[in-house]
Amino acid sequence: MIIENIINPVDTNEKFQANRLHKAKAQINYMNPDLQKIEDYFIDFATYDEYIILMKQNRHTHKTEIKAVKASKRGNDVYRYRVKKRFDELFNMPDIRCFEYKDRSKKHKTNLVYITMTLERKTSLVEAWGLIGFYFNRFKSAITKKYGNICAIRVWESHKDGYPHIHVILVFEEHEFTAVWYRGKKTACWRIQEYRDIQKYWKYGWSDIKAIDSFHGGVKYLKKYITKTVIDVDKHLKGKTRESVKPSVTKKAIRTLALLWIFSKRAFSISRGFLDLIKSLHNSNQEKPKYYVQHDLEGQSLYVWVLLGFFSGQILQNHVVRWSVTLSRREFSKIKNSRAYVERNL
């Protein structure tokens, strides 16, 4: 049975032009940015579906197919899936177990540290987002000089007032710290005894330093921030007005995503060489994952992919928006002849 795709182009490509990042940046008052306005621009961008139109051609038979692939955009369902999948791949890496979390009868050694770092409100919001990466790299350089090689998994997050803060796992290759069980008035957790030695290198605000019992345990903790931040905006706002969105987590996620978007920041990053370091510390002989591509007998890729253009709108199959569909010639002609199609510049 042939399932026909329903093509719903936007009326014109004016919205395609209006929802570009550079257009939003041009409208922002950088002396006193309006967070509500930034979020409105971002929501328009994130909830506006776009497709990449590709031609798949067999090298030998020259048979072709036209494919439409939903673009991954910060704040949409494809972006959420890709970020979550990449983050989940960390659990496939070898684990490093430093100590037993429940054994609180003694001190332990660990080379895994979890840090949260904030910024003092001495700079403007725009300056804070512009400098946060520089400050973090300076902090990492100072730590490396003191303790030797380290690798990091870092996440940005926005406070309610729009200022950024950092969550990071640091893996130390050449140094171990003493983990001690700490029980405060509100929380109880493992901390490193030498926390002040690290704290002094973050000179730009407050910091909180915890000991991690295992690599996977730390990743699980960090994943909590990624999961609550990288949401599908369209799904959360469907059938609602901005004002009717009640959960504070959703509002905070939209603010974080909007500011990451307007200031061109990645949701999270992993240091180069991180996998090699984890494998080295784990003493693992595990091979790197293999990725397979169809090849012919001469070792060449069997298919050639050609970018044709971009389509603004929705492509539905059985009334469901699809991420990837094969288009008939008639369907591609409808897309190509619509004002919502932008052809690739050759």
Image (cartoon, rainbow, N blue to C red):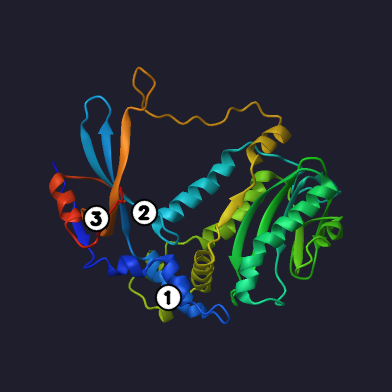
Q: How many marks?
A: 3
x 58%, y 60%: residue: 225
Q: Position of residue 41 (x, y in %)?
A: 42, 73
Residue type (three-letter) at the residue carrying disc 1: Asp
Residue at the spot x=32%, y=65% of the render? 16
Q: Which residue is mark 2?
A: 71
Task: Using a 10 Å C-alpha cutoff, classify the residue at mark 3 as few (fewer than 14 neighbours), some (14 to 19) or many (20 or more).
Answer: many
Task: Please state which of the two labelled residues, at mark 3 or mark 2, is closer to the viewer.
Answer: 2
**Which label sits on residue 248?**
none
Position above or below: 136 against 281: below
User: In the image, 32: left or right of 142?
Assistant: left
Q: Earlier in the sequence, mark 3 or mark 1?
A: 1
Distance from the alpha carbon under mark 3 to that under mark 1: 25 Å
- What amino acid is labelled 3 in the image? Ile
Rendered location of residue 213, percent (x, y): 73, 47
In the picture of the structure, the residue carrying the numbered disc 1 is 40
Q: Is residue 164 left or right of residue 40?
A: right
Residue 294's spot in the image, x, y percent? 36, 27
Q: Residue 315: which disc?
A: 3
